[in-house]
Image (cartoon, rainbow, N blue to C red):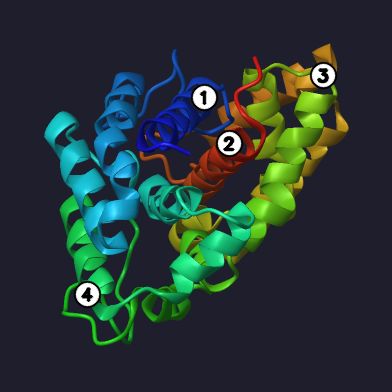
Amino acid sequence: MSPEEVAAAGQLACLLEVSAPKPGNVSPQLHFHDTRYEDFLASAVAIGPALAAAADRPLGVTIRSAIEATVRWTGSNTNLGIVLLLAPLARAARRVNGTLRQHLSVVLAGTTVADAAEVYGAIRRARPGGLGQAAAEDVSAAPTVTLRAAMALAAERDAVAREYTTDYGITFEVAAPALRAARRAGLDWTQATVECYLSLLAAVPDTHIGRKLGAGEAERVSRRAEEVRAAGGVRSLEGRRALAAFDAELRDPRNTRNPGSTADLTCAALFVVIIEGGWDR
């Protein structure tokens, strides 16, 4: 794919993800106390040049460039997890003679200590909430291991980091298949995005919630997502009522029940499906 096509796929994935009314997340009519829907639109546009250049510069530089561009347009962390997921995919998408996941495996295996240093700088710049401190290779200090090795140290507590250690196992084996199935069933992109998100949240407890409120609460939210799916989700009136109730349960003044990691993984799945299958309206 051309650099412009890769960038467009990444930007479109971001726009579809934030525009879908996913329970507990920012959407066109629902904002957080510190972040509005428009901030996410600006972020989607801002990262385009970095994604377009992903094949021509080190992975860490791509990530830091995307975050720096985002910070210039927004006042809060809107897309750190998304950028961490999309940057390797964008680099992989420019390779030839193989599948996207095969190329991704090569990209992740080739990360360096310099990549880790750039990403640590990007994380400090984004100032994500609920990050905490790590016993080893904390982002407040200079890394001594490759980016993939650093992500492995955080994999137990962070779903985005875990993807770096599994060649995006959740994205390719859970989220993207759910999205494709929803599209094959006739759902539009917005409905399919919500269904993908629900399927993912039901299958994998959200680590963003887990870091803030504990594993028990993350697992409870996953059970509720499964209940909403069983009620029909976007496919029925009863399901849509269950979706609205679930959304209300997940909202509080400090966004502590925001399934942010699940939203990030949903965006990665959108990118994968668009890259592998093209843009089919």
Disc 3 and disc 1 in contact, CB within 8 angstroms:
no
Looking at marks 1 and 4 on the same chain, the residue that comes earlier in the sequence is marked by 1
The disc at residue 235 is 3
What whole-number distance in Å separates the C-alpha atoms at marks 2 and 3?
20 Å
Q: Give residue 10's quadrant in the image.
A: top left
Residue count near mark 2 (Cα–Cα under 10 Å), binned few <14, some 14–19, many ≥20: many
Q: Position of residue 45 (x, y in %)?
A: 30, 26
Looking at marks 4 and 2 on the same chain, the residue that comes earlier in the sequence is marked by 4
Q: CA distance from mark 4 to mark 3?
A: 47 Å
Q: CA distance from mark 1 to mark 2?
A: 8 Å
In whole angstroms, how far apart are the C-alphas of marks 4 and 2? Answer: 29 Å
Q: From the image, state whether disc 1 or disc 4 is nearer to you.
A: 4
Q: Which residue is mark 2?
A: 270
Give the residue pinned by disc 4: 114
Q: What residue do we see at 70% from left, 26% from top?
A: 192
The three-letter amino acid code for the residue at tag 3 is: Arg
Label whose residue precedes the other's in the sequence (4 or 3): 4
